[in-house]
Every structure is written in C-alpha cells, then in structure tokens.
Amino acid sequence: MGTIDHTVPYSWDPPKVYKAIRDFAFGLGLSTAGLASWKYKDIMGHIRSKDTVAPLRASSTVAPQQVWLNVNHHCLTNRQKDISWMAVHGCLPTGEFMYRRHIALTVSCPHGCKAVENTYHVLAKCSVARRVWALFVPSVSHNRLLTLPRLTTENVLNGPPGGCTTTELRQQWRIIGVVKQVLWEMRNIKVFNRSTVVPTTLRRRITILLRDRAITNFHKDPVTAIAAWGVTRWKDINL
Ligand SMILES: [Zn+2]
C-alpha cells in the first residue's frame, strides 16, 4: 500500500450535489494545490472575484460613506441592516439577481405585475410595495412616528443624506427599515409558500417589529424613549 499525502486534497469523487464545488476547485487548479492555497480568505476571494455584485452606486444626494453608515446604523436590527446593505449593493436575491446566476427560472415579479423583479421593484416600484407604503406611512405619521413629507426611492434605499443625526431622523430610518424588512418577507412568502399576506397580518407584523424595538428602549430609558417614539407607553404604538 502506498502512502497518502495528506497535505493535498485527494478525494475527488464526491456525490452529485457537490459536483459544482469539485468543478470550482478544478477550475482554479486547487485540486493539486497544497494546504497554503486552501485558506478561507483566499477561497472567499476567488468566489467574490467571480461574482458581479454592484459596487455602491453613486447617489445624487447621499455620499457613499454616509450610505454605509446609514445601512449599518444601530437603530436598525441586524436583519434590517442585512436587507439594507444588500439593497444598496444590488445583491438582494431578487428574481433578476437569481436569474443571472441561473438559480431562478424567471426574472418576473412574483406578485404578478409582469415587471423585472429587482431591488427597486421589490422595495418601491411594485404595486404591492406602493400599497404597503401608502397604507403604512399615513398611519404611522398619524402616530407621530414618521414625519416624512416626501418618501423617495432614494430615501428608502440610502437613508437620510446627512445621516441619522436627530431622534426624528433615526425614528424615520428605523421605520423605513421595518417596512423594507416586511416587504422582503412578503416577497419571500409569495415565492416560497405561494401565498399572499393579507393587510391585517401585515399591520400586525409591522406593529410587532416596531414594538419590539420600543420595548427595549422603554425598558432601558423611559424618558428618552417617550421623546423618541412620541408615545407615553410602547403599547400605544399601533397602526
Ligand atoms: Zn411587482
């Protein structure tokens, strides 16, 4: 029996589901490379260099550094940061994004509007998104939580041009984050469960997400929370 060299990979007959990984490794010549070439950072570098994620788009009103600070702002939950980050980089896995990578069969919007489903479409242009913003914004403004006279696509994606410098702007950005999360969840429910979210469920979901944040704020510092949320108790946050 010969000796096996454990410093290079030697089992190259994986099950069918791992064939893509095998092809990837062979394509890069990793099949004969030593351990030094199999560092996590290097592999991720190869994957990223093959991908076509758009760099941060230059915005007419918000500087790229500011967009980065906005999407990473502490007033958003981790989930909302992820969605906002993917949205500004154009790598939210929408129909268009997945179709280009041969993962989805169609580029069309799952809500049936016959348009190409990209980030702008999901979060702003889709008839479903427009209905949600129309339902939500006046209702929240009524609760003095959102004072945004003009809600533009740019505001929704990039956040406040000067950053979240005031309580009001932070509140506004937090609410936009919640609506984006809900729109993305609705889209995924439509794609994976093939069902439509009814307005009552939608309202409940948005209220719960907002209250989740408010409860923490009220628990930590009631005085600041009252000023920040414009209500005296977290229970008063309603749609
Ligand atoms: Zn649509």
Image: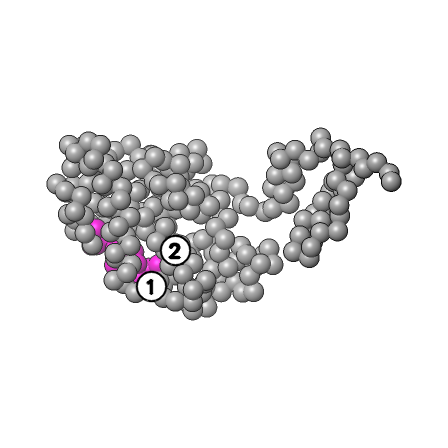
Would residue 133 appear left or right of 157 to someone viewing this image? left
Q: Residue at x 14, y 42 (%)?
A: 233
Query: Residue 205: horizontal and vertical position, in percent?
Result: 29, 54
Does the magenta segment cover residue 139? yes
User: Dot 1 lies on which element?
Assistant: loop
View extreme (right): residue: 1
Would residue 77 appear left or right of 31 to someone viewing this image? left
- Residue under numbered circle 2: 185
Identify the mark nearer the N-term, 2 or 1. 2
Rendered-image quadrant of the C terminus: bottom left
Residue 18 visible? The answer is yes
User: Dot 2 lies on which element?
Assistant: helix
Quadrant housing residue 79: top left
Q: Residue at x 49, y 44 (%)?
A: 89
- Residue under numbered circle 1: 197
Amino acid type, mark 1: Val
Q: Residue at x 69, y 55 (%)?
A: 15
Rendered position, 98 above or below 219: below
As rendered, which of 212 and 158 lies closer to the eye?
212
The range drawn in magenta is 129-140
Q: Main secondary structure of the magenta part?
A: helix
Would residue 39 appear left or right of 82 to someone viewing this image? right
Q: Are marks 2 and 1 in contact (CB under 8 Å)?
A: yes
Amino acid type, mark 2: Glu
